[in-house]
Amino acid sequence: MTTENKETRRSNRHSKQSFNSPRDILWIFFLVGVLMLVSYGTYIVYNKIKDHELQEHLENQTSQLVAQIDTELEKNDLPSEKKEHDSNTIKEIIYLPKETEKLPYKNTEEQLTQLVKQESQKLKHPKQAIIVGCVEKQAHTDQLSSYALHIETYDWKTKEQTFQKEKERTEKEIYVNTDSGEEITAQALIGSKANLLGIQQVIQQKLLDNAENPQEILDAVLALPRFDFKDATYTPEHLQINLPKNETGVDEVTLAYRDIQAFIQTDLVDPNQLAEESTDLDPNKKYISLTFDDGPNAETTPRLLQILAEKNVKATFFMLGQMAEEFPQIVKDVYEQGHEIASHSYSHPQLNAIPKEALLEQIRMTDKALYNAAGILPRTLRPPYGAISPESSDIIGKPIIQWDIDSYDWDSKNTNAVIDRVNQTSFEGGIILMHDIHPATIDAVGPVIDNLHAQGYEFVTTSQLLEQKEKPLYQYFGQKDTREI
């Protein structure tokens, strides 16, 4: 072995001995430990910085959202005091109106707090969230406002690093009269017994319209007990009626406001639920209404219909129930030709001089006869002889149509006398009384129409003349002559 090789082997052996010494191993562990501590410390510092940045971002997003909510609620026309409660992860904010005594709620703060707590408890796991409770006020019309307890929940979305609205909930919505501040009830909406009776008529027709077999419930509908204010529930969109016990098989009815518009205070409902106010009457024109009593008659009424068709005139027919039963096809012809069908009692008694049960029978039998013939209940009634009283009007439950231009055809039974009488006494907005059972009257109708046309008059039905605004418990002598009975 050469000297060089010996030296190399000694050197290698010395190196191995040096590397494997305990002091060297400890030194290596020490260096590794220091490196790990430095790395862990760096990691901790980094995460703390990151957590701080995230917390700052969360607080900034929270402040921005709260400021946005503040701004939105300033538009609510309800000056409010903000009350906040923070837990580890959930921020609860209540906006309490300063003038709580003017609100339609009792213990407003307690109710809002309870609703906010309920939403907080619904969160499935601890998470960053903001829950807001407030009272919302909304003006619908000049007379209609609503209040509601409103809750919103905003969840923190980690991925997006922002709050998002997850839920909103409205409770205990109450509608009030803006002027009085009082809660709106069905009684405030309807207002009077006359309007109640008007709505009762709408309900009866609706029940028949919706029935699969109207004939099965016709008698029950005509005998339907009257509802009262306590049976009606108000909402801005519709009126809900719980019907008194009856034999129709229907317990409740929902009425669209456009169908009962004439019988409610329209500024207390959502304007979108109303039909547009319109009239077929031109204020620059003269209108008059032809009415015929005591028919239908097999000989004279068809001839009258032919004359009216030739003259393109629509009229109102106050029919007797017994005659409608005898000639249902004529009733149907009258209705299908665009004329108005109305009641004139069943057998022409003086309605204010007979007992209540007899009066009810006169009304119901006539309604039944006209419905069977034409499929519609008469809305209005003309009492024989014009005789009416508050008591009989209440029992009848229909608007009463009188007259202010009497042709006296029932007295003269003379064609020329009828023509002259109507020509001399007619005026704008008048209701002409005639009878379609007298041949002399039928002969007079054509000349009467021609004479009035020559004077600039246009003919409309009584309901058109009164713009569909007739009400029970009132009598109408002409367009501008309405009297409470």
Image: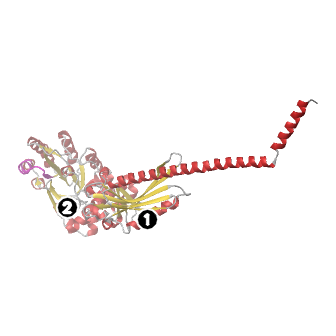
Label 1 crowd (10 A; few <14 / some 14-19 / many >=20): some
Q: Is residue 194 magenta?
A: no
Q: How many marks?
A: 2
Which region is colored magenta?
419-433
Whether residue 289 is situated above or below residue 190 in the rendered picture: above
Mark 2: which secondary structure?
strand
Color theme of the render: secondary structure
Can residue 402 be seen in this snapshot?
A: no
Q: Position of residue 424 (x, y in %)?
A: 5, 49
Label drawn at residue 113: 1
Q: Position of residue 404 (x, y in %)?
A: 12, 55
Mark 1: which secondary structure?
helix
Which image quarter: residue 322? bottom left
Which residue is identified by label 2?
Answer: 474
Q: Residue furthest right?
A: 1
Q: Nearer the viewer, residue 11 or 310?
A: 11
Q: Amino acid at mark 2?
A: Tyr
Q: Nearer the viewer, residue 114 or 132?
A: 132
